[in-house]
Image (cartoon, rainbow, N blue to C red):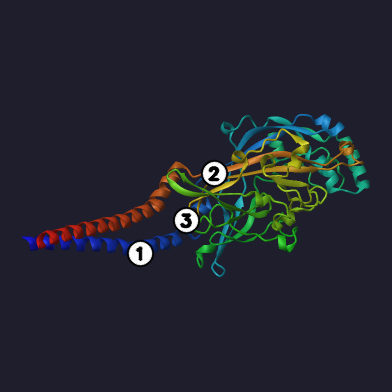
């Protein structure tokens, strides 16, 4: 009877040891299986999970706009007072709903090229008013005239056309006109061939963003979705060669197995440059563990603080000899127009920049940019891209609308918040097909290992106790 009991205990211990051993063996095997599956599914080629979501995103993406209405236009024009503004919004559009086009695989370089069609559909239910709401805003054409044409003789001619068209430094425009374009009365009188349609995002609808060429990841999954080349007249050919570097992805996805220490680089055509995000927090998004990466203040630092930003300091007078931070001068890729990009409400910008503008209230929570990335696949499941479009306004003795200005202004036009969050249905599908299977495999590994260890230890304790009692 004692032998049978001892044999049973030994057998139980052996079973426990086998289970623990099997669990221990299964862990690296399971990890290899997971890694192999992920590497296969993130490649950008027909039939993979990544390719399906890459061609046309399953996430609804919206652009919200807040317009900065100018409350004291005459005081600014006549007395060069501070510009008083109030933001009005959001006015919301659905974007990125069109599939990528001209998708061409290149097996020799393991890249895939494409263009991304642009389109915007107004969403009344997500807006505070209609596209026809009108506000007093900066006159884009008049404000840029002195910067584009510094020659005094040319400015004198432009002044006569501005007066003839009854244009001024500020104007009333609808949301639709300001965003997507309107025929400017002043430019319509210019005798030389010029584009007479003006708008912050003109042209947009029925245009394409690209041509992009990205690595598909077939030869090296660590390069998947990273931009190989990007050709666009707004960027290439204007910056010096060392400023032409385009790093990272388009931010829709990143190479898999993202760690908190990684710096995520991505290219944004809105700001004509590559930029980066660093780890900020670990979050739960609809039952999926994600890592939040945020745009750090250093990304908009002065060239003295961050030498990578030396390309975006082109006017020593405006930038206080390139010591101001929080601004990116992108005039070189906007055909010379004095467009300056910042974070909304000049968040993380030099305080002096806000001294000429009243009504701004920067807030980290509302105005920062972030990406929520699922670390195993590298897919971006939620994001918020926030930026502000400003125009540099300089004094001009030859243009009456600018004649009485006693200082330069960086006037905010609007700020935008482009957001996208994985839908509930897509989130469930993602959990079932990706994270759910990984968690299940990990659970099986841990259960086998845990049960095995418990059985082994328990039976060995019982066996030792039994032997001890028998020896007495």
At 72% from the left and 39% from the top, the residue drawn is: 413
Q: Is residue 185 above or below residue 278?
A: above
Question: Camera-side residue: 448 or 147?
Answer: 448
Q: Characterize the local packing of mark 2: few (<14), some (14-19) or many (20 or more) Cα atoms within 10 angstroms.
A: many
How far apart are labels 2 and 3 at the CA level? 18 Å
Q: For mark 3, give the secondary structure.
A: loop
At 43% from the left and 49% from the top, the residue drawn is: 430
* Sequence-first tag of 2 and 3: 3
Q: Which residue is denoted by mark 1 in the rendering? A: 29
Q: Nearer the viewer, mark 1 or mark 3?
A: 1
Q: Which residue is denoted by mark 3 in the rendering? A: 377
Q: Determine whether, in the image, residue 141 is placed left or right of residue 4.
A: right
How far apart are labels 2 and 1 at the CA level? 36 Å
Q: Position of residue 65 (x, y in %)?
A: 64, 38
Q: For mark 1, give the secondary structure.
A: helix
Outermost residue on the right side: it is: 153
Q: Nearer the viewer, mark 2 or mark 3?
A: 3
Q: Position of residue 3 (x, y in %)?
A: 8, 63
């Amino acid at each position: 009877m004692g032998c049978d009991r001892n044999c049973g205990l030994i057998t139980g211990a052996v079973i426990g040891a086998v289970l623990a051993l099997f669990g221990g063996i299964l862990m690296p095997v399971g990890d290899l299986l997971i890694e192999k599956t992920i590497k296969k599914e993130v490649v950008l080629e027909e039939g993979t999970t990544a390719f399906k979501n890459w061609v046309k995103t399953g996430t609804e993406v919206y652009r919200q706009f807040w317009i900065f209405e100018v409350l004291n236009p005459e005081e600014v024009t006549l007395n060069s007072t501070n510009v008083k503004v109030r933001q009005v919004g959001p006015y919301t559009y659905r974007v990125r709903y069109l599939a990528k086009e001209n998708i061409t695989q290149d097996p020799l370089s393991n890249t895939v090229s494409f263009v991304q069609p642009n389109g915007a559909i107004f969403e009344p239910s997500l807006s505070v008013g209609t596209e026809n709401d009108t506000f007093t805003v900066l006159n884009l054409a008049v404000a840029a005239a002195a910067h584009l044409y510094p020659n005094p003789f040319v400015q004198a001619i432009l002044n006569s056309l501005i007066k003839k068209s009854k244009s001024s430094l500020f104007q009333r425009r609808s949301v639709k006109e300001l965003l997507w374009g309107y025929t400017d009365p002043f430019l319509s009188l210019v005798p030389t061939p010029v584009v007479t349609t003006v708008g912050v995002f003109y042209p947009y609808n029925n245009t394409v963003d690209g041509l992009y060429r990205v690595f598909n990841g077939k030869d090296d999954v660590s390069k998947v979705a990273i931009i190989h080349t990007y050709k666009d007249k707004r960027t290439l050919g204007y910056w010096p060669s060392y400023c032409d570097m385009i790093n990272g992805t388009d931010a829709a996805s990143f190479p898999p197995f993202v760690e908190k220490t990684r710096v995520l680089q991505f290219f944004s055509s809105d700001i004509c440059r590559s930029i980066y995000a660093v780890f900020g927090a670990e979050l739960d998004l609809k039952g999926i563990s994600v890592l939040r990466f945020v745009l750090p203040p250093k990304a908009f630092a002065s060239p003295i603080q961050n030498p990578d930003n030396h390309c975006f300091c082109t006017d020593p007078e405006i930038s206080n000899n390139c010591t101001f931070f929080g601004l990116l001068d992108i005039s070189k890729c906007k055909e010379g127009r004095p467009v300056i990009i910042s974070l909304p409400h000049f968040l993380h910008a030099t305080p002096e920049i806000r001294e000429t503008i009243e009504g701004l209230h920067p807030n980290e929570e509302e105005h920062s940019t972030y990406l929520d990335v699922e670390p195993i696949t590298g897919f971006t499941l939620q994001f918020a891209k926030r930026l502000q479009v400003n125009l540099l306004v300089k004094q001009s003795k030859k243009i009456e609308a600018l004649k009485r200005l006693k200082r330069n202004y960086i006037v905010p036009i609007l700020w935008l918040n482009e957001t996208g969050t994985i839908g509930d249905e897509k989130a469930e599908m993602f959990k079932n097909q990706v994270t759910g299977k990984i968690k299940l495999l990990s659970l099986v590994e841990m259960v086998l290992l845990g049960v095995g260890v418990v059985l082994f230890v328990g039976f060995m304790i019982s066996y030792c106790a039994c032997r001890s009692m028998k020896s007495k």
